[in-house]
Image (cartoon, rainbow, N blue to C red):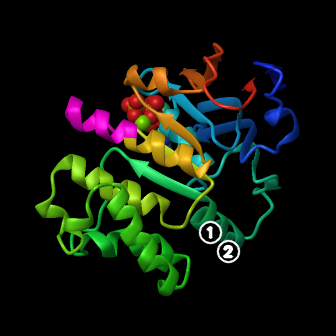
């Protein structure tokens, strides 16, 4: 069920726009015994929205994120990306939509050690068979935006943790996805680097009108977020409305 709150007279965006991503009654059972890891998750993300997903370790946050990012499939439930149901899509269409619509940032960066910074950034566009003619200038632009223009020919082993995460952010945006999924992106960084990464993700996503779902244990994200989900034992437990700092209507699915 969708509840909406009008924030002021200008703000009717969500009542008319389609969510970039909508999960309906997503459940995941794992192992031979069918252990329930997440149950009946309803969640919507709208363009330009930064949503934070918090909850204790083991509550199912990464499992949910992997399903939303089409890295894993739910046991039950439906997922819509840009209004299109993904359950009935062919593997090819799913890979295509994952490559073009969804960017990922993980705690452990997952850069390829044998590739340079710019080669790492270009991996998703190569996988999506996008033209290098367009993607190389975009990679340069993104590396400039994340403050690493001077590091393009370096290898990951020559970078700090914060720099590696900035490369991962540039990589996540290379295909201009409409949705960015982040799993504890500041979890292995010191406080200062973490704060730089937070500011960067916030400004890059707001500029691009992207929807972001941020899994984090860091309460500082709460101050930046438009929407706050809390997971507990595989369910979305509570949805306190957050302040609204942009032209939108707050929703809780
Ligand atoms: N394939 C699997 N087989 C068995 N149990 C699994 C499997 N995948 C996940 N789980 C269990 O599901 C629960 C949720 O795991 P998940 O990684 O989603 O938690 P999380 O909220 O991301 O935790 P953290 O904050 O520590 O990253 C955990 O208890 C985990 O052990
Ligand atoms: Mg996790």
Camera-side residue: 145 or 183? 145
Could you say which disc has been placed on residue 95 in the image? 1
Q: Position of residue 135 (x, y in %)?
A: 48, 77
**Quadrant of image for the N terminus:** top right
Q: Position of residue 112 (x, y in %)?
A: 28, 68
Report the magenta residues as a range: 185-199
Could you say which disc has been placed on residue 71 in the image? none
Residue 86 is covered by the magenta coloring: no
For this orientation, the residue located farthest to the left is 158
Magenta-highlighted stretch: main secondary structure? helix
Q: Circle 2 sits in a helix, a strand or a loop, which is it?
A: helix
Q: Position of residue 218 (x, y in %)?
A: 37, 24
Camera-side residue: 79 or 211? 211
Label 2 near label 1: C-beta < 8 Å? yes
Question: Mark 1 vs ligand 1: CB under 8 Å?
Answer: no
Q: Residue at the spot x=30%, y=39% of the render?
A: 196
Crowding at label 1, few (<14), some or many (≥20) Cα neighbours within 10 Å? some
Q: Residue at the spot x=75%, y=57% of the render?
A: 86
How many numbered discs?
Answer: 2
Relative side of 222 to 148, left or right: right
Relative side of 114 to 13, left or right: left
Relative side of 127 to 86, left or right: left
Q: Residue at the spot x=74%, y=42% of the render?
A: 22
The residue pinned by badge 2 equals 92
């Amino acid at each position: 069920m969708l509840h909406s709150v009008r924030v002021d007279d200008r703000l009717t965006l969500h009542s008319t726009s389609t969510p970039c991503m909508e999960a309906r009654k997503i459940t995941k059972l794992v192992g031979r015994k069918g252990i329930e890891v997440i149950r009946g998750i309803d969640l919507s993300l709208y363009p330009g929205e930064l949503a934070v997903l918090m909850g204790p370790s083991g509550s199912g946050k990464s499992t949910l994120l992997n399903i939303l990012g089409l890295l894993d499939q739910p046991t039950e439930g439906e997922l819509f990306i840009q209004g299109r149901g993904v359950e009935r899509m062919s593997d090819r269409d799913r890979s295509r939509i994952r490559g073009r619509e969804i960017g990922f940032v993980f705690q452990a960066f997952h850069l390829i050690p044998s590739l340079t910074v710019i080669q790492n950034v270009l991996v998703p566009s190569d996988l999506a068979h996008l033209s290098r003619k367009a993607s190389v200038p975009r990679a340069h632009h993104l590396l400039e935006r994340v403050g690493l223009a001077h590091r393009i020919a370096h290898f990951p082993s020559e970078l700090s943790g914060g720099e590696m995460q900035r490369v991962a952010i540039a990589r996540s945006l290379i295909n201009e996805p409409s949705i960015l999924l982040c799993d504890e992106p500041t979890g292995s960084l010191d406080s200062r680097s973490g704060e730089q990464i937070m500011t960067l993700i916030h400004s890059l996503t707001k500029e691009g009108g992207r929807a972001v779902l941020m899994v984090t244990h860091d309460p500082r994200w709460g101050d930046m977020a438009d929407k706050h989900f809390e997971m507990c034992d595989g369910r979305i437990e509570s949805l306190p409305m957050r302040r609204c700092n942009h032209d939108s209507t707050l929703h809780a699915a």
